[in-house]
Image (tube, helix red, strand yellow):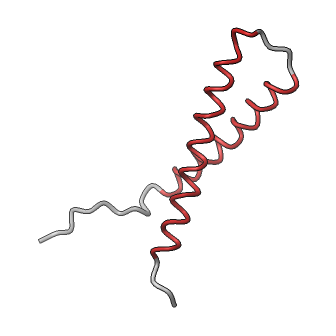
Amino acid sequence: MSDSHPDPERYWKHRRRLAYTAMGALLVTLAAGLFFELRASNLPLIESLGWAFAVIVIGYYGNNAIEAFSRPKK
């Protein structure tokens, strides 16, 4: 019988790239909100983008913490 559980390490490089891209996009979004003059109609979009990118970054680091905690101690 083969193990049908997927390998969690298979897409780890892609998750890391997604998290780093989201970090960069979060910084760009923050800079746009702080340093550029924005119309009031654009503020909900900037806020939503910031939250979306933050969720990706928090999920990445949360997953790292859970995997580190669940590894057997040496």
Question: How many numbered marks have been drawn onto this rendered protein structure?
Answer: 0
**Quadrant of the rendering where the N terminus is positioned:** bottom left
Judge by depth and name the residue closer to the eye, 17 or 28.
28
Image-quadrant location for residue 30: top right
Q: Position of residue 49 (x, y in %)?
A: 63, 28
Q: Residue at x 51, y 90 (%)?
A: 74
**Where is 32 relative to 2, above or below?**
above
Q: Residue furthest right?
A: 35
**Where is 33 relative to 11, above or below?**
above
Q: Residue at x 21, y 68 (%)?
A: 3
**Where is 32 relative to 24, above or below?**
above
Q: Position of residue 40 (x, y in %)?
A: 74, 10
Judge by depth and name the residue closer to the eye, 40 or 6.
40
User: Does residue 15 appear to the left or right of 38 in the view shown?
Assistant: left
Q: Residue at x 67, y 26 (%)?
A: 47
Q: Residue at x 45, y 83 (%)?
A: 72
**Where is 22 relative to 58, above or below?**
above
